[in-house]
Amino acid sequence: MIRKFTALVLVAAALQACATSDRLSYVGQAPPMTPIQNPADLAGTGPSQLPMPVPRMPQQRYAQNSTANNSLWNANSPTFFGDPRADQVGDIVTVNIDISDSAQLNNTTNRSRSSAEDSDLTNFLGADLTGFFNDNIDPSSLTSLGSSSSLAGSGSVNRTESISLTVAALVTQVLPNGNLVIAGRQEVRVNNEVRELLITGIARPQDIGSDNTIAHTQIAEARISYGGRGHLSDAQRPRYGQELYDILMPF
């Protein structure tokens, strides 16, 4: 137990040292922004491994034989000059995030129980045992057991969330069934506070609108993160010692 506690303290100290050194690296300066990197790394360490149907032959983006004779119109394109919607690795798609959720729950529990047991021993195999016990023991009431318990609990949840954001994401992978793996990150720095928006997920090409936009509700396995770092976020976060105390303290 002491070894585990010592190891935990050492790990927490190492994490605190790393985080402290990171904050110390920009004392008196604005927090640094994340450099541009491969968007595929946002979704994981490599290509997504998901259950897929039998791969089919990829279709050409603009089929040459899809135009009628003596016609400039492409039957597979919603526009005259081509389809502007993202469908290949490297294409950009705009994601509209509009979250407006509310939940209200109320639970009440009441429980009570009582029990009583009495026993006597005045006769046994026809013999009268009333004189067998001394004057301090009443054979008509040898044992008397009773118990009672009660429980009353109540809980309520009242939550409201509202987020309205727009972010451009990049197609990082085309799955064998044609679905698109998208990932995007947006950072905005105001004074000494950096706000970061991160989104990853899987989208169907047919759900992308003609204006090359898609709603977050149409993205499967969506991961949306909106947070920040900087002076304000650091002031609102408890110290590492307090976090460690809250984790280890059992009461």
Image (cartoon, grey):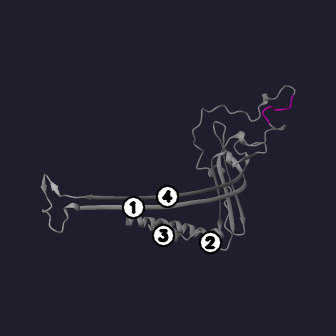
Q: Residue at x 77, y 34 (%)?
A: 62
Specify the label residue 149 is tagged with: 1
Q: Secondary structure at mark 1?
A: strand
Residue at numbered disc 2: 235
- Crowding at label 4, few (<14), some or many (≥20) Cα neighbours within 10 Å? few
Horizontal placement of 85 versus 158: left or right? right
Location of residue 92 with respect to 160 vertically, above or below:
above
Marks 2/1: CA–CA distance: 46 Å
Instruction: Verify CB contact (< 8 Å) between mark 3 and mark 2.
Output: no
Horizontal placement of 79 versus 105: left or right? right
- Give the foreground label among 2 and 1: 1
- Foreground residue among 125 and 162: 125
Q: Amino acid at mark 4?
A: Thr
Marks 3/2: CA–CA distance: 19 Å
- Earlier in the chain: of badge 1 and badge 4, it is 4
- Foreground residue among 217 and 124: 124
Marks 3/4: CA–CA distance: 32 Å
Residue at numbered disc 4: 109
Q: Residue at x 79, y 35 (%)?
A: 77
Marks 1/4: CA–CA distance: 14 Å
Q: Amino acid at mark 2?
A: Ala
Location of residue 148 with respect to 58 vertically, above or below:
below
